[in-house]
Amino acid sequence: MAKCSIHKLISGVVVTAGRNTLLVKYKDTSSHDGQTGWFHPDDTLTDYEEPQEGALRILKEQLGLRPNRVAFGLFESFKGHDRTHHLMFHYRAHFPKGPAITPSANIAVATWFQLDRMPPKSAFAHQGWSRDVIEKLTKSGK
């Protein structure tokens, strides 16, 4: 199937354990607009992949995590740096305690942070965008 040059369908997952959240930095940032800061795990959906299936795939492939479920939390639509229209599905996966993670080859670092002690917005990719998403999904009780 030909790659769409107009739209990107993306799923992201805010992973929490207790009052902590998991943040990642990617080695190859080409699919993340060249951004090098912190992200919540995310990826472009594959052909015909449902957003929720994508969220589960992302956790398994990028971090070796297999939650029982992910809960839909937020939808966003915005213009990406590559001028494609991004349609972003954010999910949340919650674990009672921090599970062991097995980062994939493209994860430069994966670290748990207390929700009230995350890095400053300036340390996140896209001017703190991921931090804003995390705060929306964790403060709303979703």
Image (tube, rainbow, N blue to C red):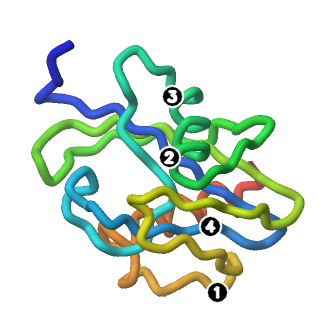
Compute the Cα span from label 4 to label 2: 12 Å
Nearer-the-camera pick, 116 or 64: 64
Q: Earlier in the sequence, mark 3 or mark 1?
A: 3
The location of residue 35, given as percent across then percent down, is 26, 67
Question: On the image, numbered disc 2 is attached to which residue?
Answer: 12
Q: How many marks?
A: 4
| Relative to 59, 104 lies left or right | left
Q: Is residue 95 above or below residue 51?
A: below
Q: Which mark is residue 22?
A: 4
Compute the Cα span from label 3 to label 1: 29 Å
Compute the Cα span from label 2 to label 3: 9 Å
Question: On the image, numbered disc 1 is attached to which residue?
Answer: 117
* Badge 4: residue crowd in 10 Å (few <14, some 14–19, many ≥20): many
Q: Is residue 12 above or below residue 111?
A: above
Which residue is rendered at x = 66% and y = 57% of the image? 15
Q: Earlier in the sequence, mark 4 or mark 2?
A: 2
The location of residue 100, given as percent across then percent down, is 74, 63
Q: Is residue 16 above or below residue 58?
A: below
Q: Earlier in the sequence, mark 2 or mark 3?
A: 2
Question: On the image, numbered disc 3 is attached to which residue?
Answer: 51
Nearer-the-camera pick, 52 or 62: 62
Element class at badge 2: strand
Element class at badge 3: helix
Q: Earlier in the sequence, mark 3 or mark 4?
A: 4
Compute the Cα span from label 1 to label 4: 12 Å
* Badge 3: residue crowd in 10 Å (few <14, some 14–19, many ≥20): many
| Relative to 71, 122 lies left or right | left
Q: Earlier in the sequence, mark 1 or mark 2?
A: 2
* Badge 1: residue crowd in 10 Å (few <14, some 14–19, many ≥20): few
